Image (cartoon, grey):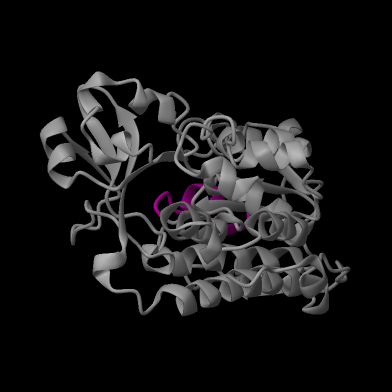
Amino acid sequence: MKPVTVAAIIAAGLVLTAETAAAQVEFKDHRGKEIVLDAPPQKVVTIVRSGPILYRAVDGSADHIAAVNQSFFKRDYVAGLYGELLPELGTLTPTAAIEGFVPNIEAILEIAPDAVIQWASEGAEPLERVGLNVIIWDCCTAEQRRDYVTLTGHLTGKEAHAKAILDLQDASAATMRETFAAMPDADKVSALYIDQFGDQIRIIANGSLDLSLSGVTNPAADDTGQWWQTIDLEQLFAWNPDMILIPPYAHDLTPASFYGNALLADLDAVKNRRVYKIPAFAGSPDAPEIFLSSPWLAAVAHGADTVPQLRGEIHDAYAAIYGIDLGAAQMDSVLYMDQNAASDGYSAIFR
C-alpha cells in the first residue's frame, strides 16, 4: 500500500484549518431539517456517544463541547485510548443523558447550549419542545457515518477540515481497493469477530467495515443485517475461521484468552496463533480514524508487504485528523503490541 506521509497530507491540505468562526451556519441534518445558527456554536451538547470524538476531530479542540453522554466514558473513550491520546476529552461534563440516549433535559437547560446532537431513533421533539436547537444524526450505514464528519464540519464552520478527513479516508480506501479488488475468493482469509466468550459466544456478523478492501471474508455475514449474533462452540468449529478478531472495547478478551482455552486447541485460528486484538483506532465505529482498520487487517491477513510502512500511515492519520504527534509508546498502545505479542507475525509487522 502506498504510504500516506505527513508531507503529502500537508500538500493536499489535510491539516487543521483556520476557518472563520463568524460565518452563519446553515445546513440540513439527517431528517432534512434546515439548521440555521448565527455562528458556529460556543456550547454544544452531544447525546450521541461518539459525538465528542467527531467534534474534537473536526473542530480541532474540545473547548465548545459543553456536555456528553456518560456512556462515552464507559466505552468509546476507553476503547479508543482517548484518555491517553486526547486527555482534554476526559474533563467533559457527563450529564447529557439520563440513561442510554434519553436526554437529561434539566441538566441541558442549565447549560443553555447553542446546539444539541441527538440520534434519529430518539427524536428531537423532547428537546425542541423546550426551545433547543437539535441536530439529528441517523444510524448506522457507512454513508451516514461519513455524514457525521460532514455535518460536524457544517456545524463548526470547519467544512474544509471535514472534507480533508473524508479525502484521507477515500484515498486509503482507493489504494486498498486497487490492491485487493481482483483477489480471488479462494485467496481471501476468513476472520470472525468475537466480542463475548462464555456459555454463549457473541460475534459481529454484519459490521460496517468493507472487508473486501483487506482481502478478508466474515463467515458469519448474512442477509439479516443484524450486527450481533450469538453462536455455540459447534458453530464456531463449523466455521473454523483462519483468524479471530477481538474488538478493542472487549476489555475482558485478549488473544491469550483463546490460546489458553483447552476447548479451542483444535481451532485453526488458535493452533496457528492468529487471534488478534483490533487496535484502538476501531474503538468506535464512528471514529474518523477507523478507516485504518482496513490496512491493518490486510497486514495481519496477508503480511506486511501488502501494506508497507503502516506505522507511518497511522502516525500521519492521527496527525492529520487530530493534530497530535503519536510517540513510539503511544503507537504501541494503539496497536496493542503487548496483547498481540504472542500472535503470528504481529511484532514483525508492526515494529
**Where, by quadrant of the figure, is residue 218 drawn?**
bottom left
**Where, by quadrant of the figure, is residue 111 drawn?**
top right
Q: Is residue 178 above or below residue 308?
A: below
The residue that appears at 73% across and 46% down in the rendered structure is: 65
Which residue is more in the foreground, 3 or 196?
3
* Residue 339 x/y as whole percent: 53, 30
* Residue 266 x/y as whole percent: 20, 32
- In magenta stretch: residue 106: no
Q: Quadrant of the N terminus?
A: bottom right
Q: Does the image show residue 18? A: yes
Direction from residue 324 to residue 260 in the image, left or right: left
Q: Is residue 326 above or below residue 100?
A: below
The residue that appears at 25% across and 40% down in the rendered structure is: 268
Count the marks. Answer: 0
The residue that appears at 54% across and 57% down in the rendered structure is: 304
Which residue is more in the foreground, 94 or 246?
246
Give, as a single range, the part of the protein colored magenta. Answer: 121-135
Direction from residue 91 to residue 236 in the image, left or right: left
* Residue 126 x/y as whole percent: 49, 47
**Where, by quadrant of the figure, is residue 331 drawn?**
top right
Direction from residue 70 to residue 179 in the image, left or right: left
Q: Quadrant of the C terminus?
A: top right
Which residue is more in the foreground, 337 or 148?
337
Please, what is the dominant secondary structure of the magenta stretch?
loop
* Residue 80 x/y as whole percent: 60, 41
- In magenta stretch: residue 131: yes
Which residue is more in the foreground, 71 or 217?
217
Q: Does the image show residue 89? A: no
